[in-house]
Image (tube, rainbow, N blue to C red):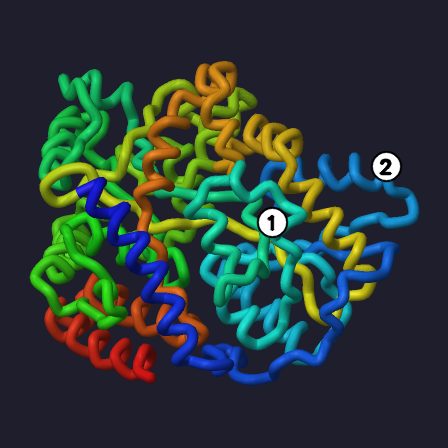
C-alpha cells in the first residue's frame, strides 16, 4: 500500500494541474469567489512587515522573529495571531485580500490553500531560483506550486501519526503498536479490561466539522485502499474502499471507541485530552510530541507514550499531506523584506530551531538524517515515511467548496444523521459538479 500511495500521490499532483486549469480563476466558498487582486507583483520595498499566522503554541515563532528583528532594526516583523481554527484563519486572510488590504505581508498558509490564493492573485509569485528547492522534501515543494510556478515556500510539513499510551499497552500485554484498525480495537479492549482504565477513551482524531475532518476522513478512505479522486481527477467516494474507510469511523463512534466528546475535537482539544490521560490512541500531527512530553506538569503522559504510523484496514495506513507554506500578499508593502523573511524561516538553522522547540515537521531533507535529532525525536524516520507516502487533498481552486462538502458528508455519517451510503452518494454528486470543467 505504501508504494502504491507514492504512485497515487504523483498521479494526483499531475491531475490537479489539469483540474486547476479547467477551473480558471473561480474562487471557493466563505467569500473566496473571484476578487482577483490588483496588487503589485514586484518584489520591491523594504521596511516593517506583518506576519499573519495561526497561534504560536510554543513561543519559538516569536523567538525567531525577535532574532530577525535584532538583526534587521529597519525591517521589523510583527506577528498577527489569527484564530485557532484553520478554517477561520483562511477566512480572515481571504477577507483581507478581498479588500486589497496591506495589513498582512507574509501569510502562513495551509498547504492546500496555495491554488486558491494564487488563482485569485491574492499572493505573489516567488523566484524559484532563489531557493534551494532540491534540498527540500519534494512533496512539500509541490504544495507551494500553482501551474508550475512557485507561490508559497514550504516551511513546515506534516504527516499524520498515531500517538499511543505505551505504558498502558505494555501493562495490558500488547507489545507492538497496532498496524490495523482491528489491532487498534483489540489493544484498546485489553487496556480497558483493567478496572482503572474502564472510562478511558479508545481513539480520537480531528472530528469536528472543519478542515481537520477533511484530513481524517481522507486518511480513513486512503487507509482502506480508496481515494477521494482517481488518477484522472474523477471523484471515487462511492467505491467499496471509500465506504469501508468511512465505516471505520462510523462504527468506532457508534461502539463508543471514539468518545462522544471527540466529535468536537480539533487539534488542540484532542491534544489536551491526550495529555490529560483521557485517550489510549490519538491521530495527530507531530507537533504534539514536544508538548505531550513536557515535564513541567502540563502533561500527565510525559515519557509514557510512543509514536507509530497510522493503522489501516489491512496494514499501515496512508496519511493526508499536511503542512504550512509562507507566501507574500499581493497587496503588501515592502515585499523585498517579506521575501528575505521567508528565506530566513525556511533556512536550515531556523527549521532546526523550530524542530527542537516544537517537534513540528521540517521541510529540509537533511534534518531527517541528523543522528542527534533522531536520538531526540525517534519518530523522525516514521514521520519522513508518512510525508513521503502521503496523499494530498484535492488541489482545486474551489477548494473551500470541496472541503465543505467532504466535512458535511463525513460528519453526517459519523454522528448518525445519515447512512454511509447516503453521505457518500451525495458527496460524489457534489464533487462531480465542483471538479467538472
* Side of 75 relative to 197 (left or right): right
Q: Position of residue 143 (x, y in %)?
A: 47, 55
> Quadrant location of the C terminus?
bottom left
Q: Position of residue 404 (x, y in %)?
A: 37, 72
The residue located at (30%, 43%) in the rendering is 389
The residue where tag 1 is placed is 55
* Side of 79 relative to 274 (left or right): right
The residue where tag 2 is placed is 71
Residue 60 in view in this figure = yes
Q: Position of residue 208 (x, y in %)?
A: 36, 59
The residue located at (84%, 48%) in the rendering is 76
**Structural crowding at the residue carrying mark 1, measured as other residues with C-alpha within 10 Å and reported as few (<14), some (14–19) or many (≥20):** some
Residue 254 in view in this figure = no
Whole-Å distance between the Cαs marked 2 and 1? Answer: 24 Å
Which numbered mark, 2 or 1, is in the foreground of this view?
A: 2
**Structural crowding at the residue carrying mark 2, measured as other residues with C-alpha within 10 Å and reported as few (<14), some (14–19) or many (≥20):** few
Give residue 36's quadrant in the image.
Answer: bottom right
**Quick one: SS at disc 1?**
loop
Give residue 425's quadrant in the image.
Answer: bottom left
Amino acid at each position: 500500500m505504501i508504494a502504491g500511495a507514492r504512485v497515487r500521490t504523483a498521479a494526483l499532483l499531475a491531475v490537479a494541474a489539469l483540474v486547476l486549469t479547467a477551473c480558471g480563476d473561480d474562487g471557493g466558498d466563505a467569500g473566496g469567489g473571484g476578487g482577483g487582486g490588483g496588487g503589485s507583483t514586484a518584489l520591491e520595498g523594504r521596511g516593517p512587515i506583518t506576519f499573519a499566522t495561526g497561534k504560536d503554541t510554543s513561543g519559538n515563532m516569536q523567538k525567531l522573529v525577535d532574532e530577525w528583528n535584532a538583526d534587521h532594526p529597519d525591517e521589523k516583523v510583527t506577528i498577527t495571531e489569527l484564530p485557532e481554527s484553520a478554517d477561520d484563519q483562511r477566512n480572515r486572510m481571504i477577507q483581507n485580500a478581498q479588500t486589497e488590504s496591506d495589513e498582512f505581508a507574509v501569510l502562513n498558509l495551509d498547504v492546500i490553500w496555495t491554488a486558491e490564493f494564487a488563482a485569485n492573485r491574492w499572493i505573489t509569485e516567488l523566484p524559484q531560483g532563489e531557493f534551494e528547492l532540491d534540498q527540500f522534501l519534494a512533496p512539500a515543494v509541490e504544495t507551494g506550486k500553482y501551474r508550475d510556478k512557485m507561490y508559497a515556500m514550504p516551511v513546515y510539513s506534516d504527516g499524520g501519526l498515531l500517538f499511543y499510551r505505551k505504558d498502558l499497552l505494555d501493562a495490558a500485554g500488547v507489545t507492538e503498536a497496532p498496524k490495523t484498525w482491528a489491532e487498534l480495537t483489540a489493544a484498546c479492549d485489553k487496556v480497558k479490561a483493567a478496572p482503572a482504565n474502564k472510562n478511558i477513551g479508545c481513539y480520537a482524531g480531528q472530528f469536528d466539522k472543519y478542515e481537520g475532518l477533511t484530513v481524517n476522513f481522507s486518511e480513513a478512505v486512503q487507509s482502506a485502499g480508496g481515494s477521494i479522486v482517481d488518477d484522472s481527477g474523477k471523484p471515487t467516494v462511492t467505491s467499496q474502499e471509500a465506504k469501508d474507510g468511512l465505516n471505520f469511523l462510523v462504527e468506532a463512534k457508534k461502539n463508543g471507541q471514539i468518545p462522544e466528546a471527540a466529535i468536537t475535537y480539533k487539534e488542540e482539544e484532542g491534544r489536551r485530552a491526550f495529555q490529560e490521560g483521557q485517550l489510549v490512541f490519538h491521530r495527530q500531527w507531530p507537533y504534539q510530541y514536544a508538548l505531550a512530553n513536557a515535564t513541567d506538569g502540563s502533561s500527565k503522559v510525559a515519557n509514557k507514550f510512543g509514536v507509530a504510523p497510522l493503522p489501516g484496514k489491512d496494514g499501515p495506513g496512508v496519511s493526508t499531506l499536511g503542512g504550512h507554506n509562507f507566501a507574500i500578499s499581493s497587496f503588501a508593502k515592502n515585499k523585498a523584506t517579506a521575501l528575505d523573511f521567508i528565506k530566513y524561516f525556511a533556512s536550515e538553522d531556523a527549521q532546526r530551531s523550530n524542530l527542537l522547540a516544537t517537534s513540528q515537521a521540517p521541510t529540509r531533507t537533511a534534518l531527517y538524517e541528523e543522528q542527534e535529532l533522531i536520538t531526540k525525536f525517534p519518530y523522525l524516520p516514521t514521520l519522513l515515511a508518512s510525508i513521503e507516502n502521503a496523499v494530498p487533498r484535492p488541489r482545486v481552486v474551489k477548494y473551500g467548496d470541496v472541503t465543505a462538502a467532504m466535512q458535511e458528508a463525513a460528519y453526517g455519517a459519523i454522528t448518525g444523521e445519515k447512512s454511509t451510503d447516503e453521505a457518500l452518494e451525495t458527496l460524489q454528486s457534489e464533487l462531480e459538479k465542483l471538479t467538472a470543467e
